[in-house]
Image (cartoon, helix red, strand yellow):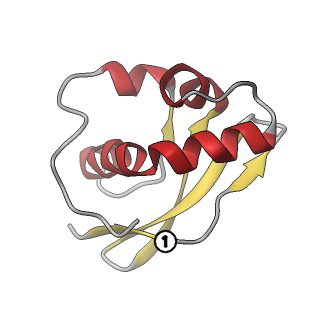
Amino acid sequence: MEITFSDDTTSFDGSNLVLRFTAYVDRRPVECAISAEALEDHFGAASPLEDDLQRAFTRGRERIHSVCATALEQNDGASVELHSGLFRVEGMERDRRTNS
């Protein structure tokens, strides 16, 4: 399974308090998301406001993509929403090169 990520900016979904971004699984676009809680807990977002979440995502992009790629592999390439707990699970991050 080949997993890459778009350089496109993320989009803020205020009703669900997530940032959405695109992964490509075998060149097929898959919408993924990361919760505001995860960005606050693990990437230093000061609040759930869009600007704070965007800055935190930018700072943590490599680690976010690594955990997302592992989650995509584990669910056969279906869309994922990353929550805070996933960043605490051992083995969710791999030393991989992704297009960030």
Judged left or right of residue 41, residue 61 is left
Residue density around tag 1, few if under 14, some if 14–19, many if 20 or more, within 10 Å: some
Give the vertical position of 11 relative to 26 (above or below): above
Q: On the image, numbered disc 1 is attached to which residue?
A: 6
Please tell me in which quadrant of the rendered image residue 34 appears.
top right
> Residue at point 31% right, 52% down?
69
Judged left or right of residue 55, residue 83 is left
Q: What is the x, y in percent for residue 43?
A: 51, 31
Relative depth, front residue between 57 and 70? 57
Q: What is the x, y in percent for residue 52?
A: 73, 37
Relative depth, front residue between 26 and 88? 88
Q: What is the x, y in percent for residue 8?
A: 59, 71
Please tell me in which quadrant of the rendered image residue 97 appears.
bottom left
Q: What element carries label 1?
A: loop
Residue 33 visible, this orientation: no
Give the vertical position of 73 relative to 42 (above or below): below
Q: What residue type is labelled 1?
A: Ser
Give the vertical position of 100 relative to 69 (above or below): below
Residue 12 visible, this orientation: yes
> Residue at point 18% right, 55% down?
96
Relative depth, front residue between 77 and 56? 56
> Residue at point 58% right, 58% down?
21
Query: Quick one: quadrant of the N terminus?
Result: bottom left
> Residue at point 18% right, 44% down?
94
Query: Quick one: quadrant of the C terminus?
Result: bottom left
